[in-house]
Amino acid sequence: MDLRSLLYGLLFALMWSSAFTSARIIVAEAPPILSLALRFAISGMLGIAIAYAIGQRMQLTRGQWRAVIIFGICQNALYLGLNFVAMQWIEASLAAIIASSLPLLVALANWVIFSERTRLLGVAGLLAGTFGVLLIMGTRLQGGADLTGIAMGLLAVIALTIATLSVRGASGGGNLLMVVGLQMLVGAAALLPVGLVLETWDVTWTPRLIAAFAYTTLIPGLAATWIWFLLVARIGATPAATFHFLNPFFGVVIAWALLGERLGPLDIVGVVIVTFGILAVQLSRLKRA
């Protein structure tokens, strides 16, 4: 892993983790599903426009078209849609912790469903990471966290796990920014009718909302996804996934710093356990690869 790959990984983890805080700001003053559909529409059109400007076209491989559809629905519509709705009731830090269990769920599914051989380090990481997530959720439930919001967060990360296991070849064939833009439009198309049926466009426009919407559209929405595909294409999916171990730490710290969310001793212990659990799982997969 060279210096550029390390920089890509750190930027991705920081951008991805910050999305929960900006989303929490948005859903406090705007309808979550319609806001997310608008964000995807803008991000998608920007991504496609930039892709055309630098010479990319909609000449994608079969694996890339599959990635556009599956990620557009499972990642953008289901994963982020459920998270946006959930953050009407739960804190951004808790949503980030639940979402950070993605590498653990992917490793568990590969082990149980696909009989993938798992080293002792990986098993220990799965157990530790699961314990850390349960510790944090138990602490938050005792503090009054909404069970419906937690359930939505869990369903969201399961949807993203399915997408991750289903898609292969998304980074091959070039045109990465085009892939990113197209999957954003798929997400917008899937969310818009749901939002029109369930919500009304009732928005309290404030500088804070405008800044959060612009940030989440351009940085976590467009830039982070593009950087992720660049990172996977550069070093492979397994080494790239090791950067997910930074998400629990970044997600909790950003929510604490910008939103003033509580950060108790058990939260810190849980974050540390989850972080090292994810790292152990990914290192075990890296050694096998």
Image: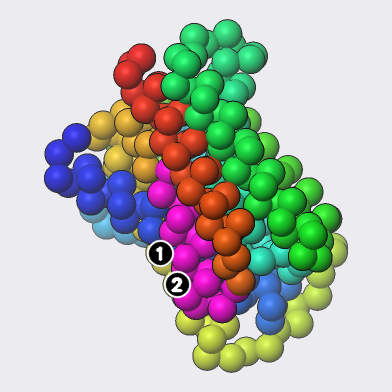
**Whether residue 167 is visible:** no
Percent position (x, y) of residue 288? 36, 14
Q: Secondary structure at mark 1?
A: helix
Percent position (x, y) of residue 82? 71, 53
Q: Is residue 241 magenta?
A: no
Along the horizontal axis of the image, is 273 left or right of 285?
right
Q: Residues within 10 Å of mark 1 (few under 14, many from 20)?
A: some
Residue occupying image coordinates x 24% and y 34%:
234
Magenta-colored segment: predominant secondary structure: helix
* Residue segment shown in magenta: 244-261
The dot on residue 215 is 2
> Is residue 258 shown above or below 277?
below
What is the residue that sits farthest to the bottom in this orientation? 206
Quadrant position of the C terminus in the picture: top left
Residue holding disc 1: 219
Q: Quadrant of residue 110?
A: top right
Q: Are marks 2 and 1 in contact (CB under 8 Å)?
A: yes
Q: Residues within 10 Å of mark 2 (few under 14, many from 20)?
A: some
Residue occupying image coordinates x 27% and y 57%:
53
What is the residue that sits farthest to the front in this orientation? 265
Q: Secondary structure at mark 2?
A: helix
Residue occupying image coordinates x 57% and y 50%:
270
Residue type pointed to by label 1: Ile
